[in-house]
Amino acid sequence: MSAPVDLEEMRWHALSSSEIARVLDVDLTGLSHGEVDRQVARFGPNALPKASRRSPLLRFLAQFNNTLIYVLLAGALAAALLDHMIDASVIVAVVIVNAIIGYIQEGKAEQALEAIQQMIAPKASVIRDGARLTIPVAEIVPGDLVLIEAGDRVPADLRLLHARRLLIDEALLTGESVAAEKHEAVLPAETVLADRQNMAFSGTLVAAGQANGIAVATGAHTQIGRISSLIQSVEVMATPLLTQIDQFARRFTWFVLAGAWRCLRSLSWRAATTGSMP
């Protein structure tokens, strides 16, 4: 059995075609159906992991899970009990507007993940068993010989074997507004991502030319897959100001509760004293 290959750490741009064939244990003229099954077992499908999603209702209710919000809601209830309906309405409106803003901001991360999913083309052309086939992108495996031309979205990270006047728009990865010119020559190992001219990355758009290349990374192992994983792993962190506000709200809550307890005790004592007087 072939040794495990870390697709993300390999410097494919610095390897020759024969070295790529040895690492992936494939024939670069196209896979057979048996080799495809073997590669699927080794590397899995060419699909980005789906993000776990909370229901919209739970995401909205989570915006109220804050000490300061609890204090404001308690204040609104107290104002309503004292028949100060305008004050109560204003407080409730502020809380709801804050929840709506938080809900919208939290949804932006999910929208970003959905946008990344849409960057992957549904179909791709490959050479298998000596014939050109059009297959679903999810079925591409490392070692597949993939054909791309103008107008295509690159279906996986490819090490180009032959390129003819190939230009690829890589703005989603590098931010460059000008399409990058590509070729198949081996590059130094230290070449940075934006300068890897012998690579075509998943999700990028072929602006001109034609090429074929060997799929060297699929699914979550691609560059766009790594971006997707980073977005999913982002932890929501409170800013220093929000942390201070939360701490103040906690102290203020205890202060109010202590004051209310003292008031109740004082009223009870006065009631008891008044009741005991002749």
Image (cartoon, rainbow, N blue to C red):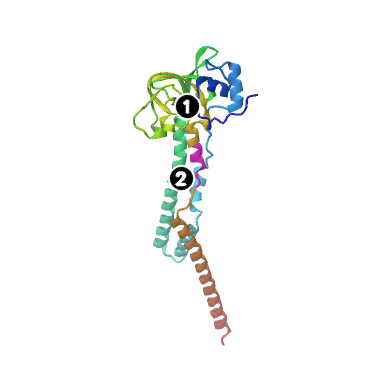
Q: Residue furthest top?
A: 130
Crowding at label 1, few (<14), some or many (≥20) Cα neighbours within 10 Å?
many
Does residue 65 show up magenta in the picture?
A: no
Whether residue 143 can be seen here: no
Q: For the N terminus, which image quadrant?
A: top right
Where is mark 1, residue-wise? 13
Where is mark 2, residue-wise? 106
Does residue 232 show up magenta in the picture?
A: yes
Mark earlier in primary sequence (2, 1): 1
The answer to whether 276 appears left or right of 180 in the picture is right
- List x then y, in percent, for residue 228: 49, 36
The answer to whether 194 appears left or right of 130 in the picture is left
Q: Which residues are magenta?
A: 228-235
- List x then y, in percent, for residue 4: 61, 29
Helix, strand or loop under label 1: helix
Q: Amino acid at mark 2?
A: Glu
Q: For the C terminus, which image quadrant?
A: bottom right
- List x then y, in percent, for residue 205: 40, 26
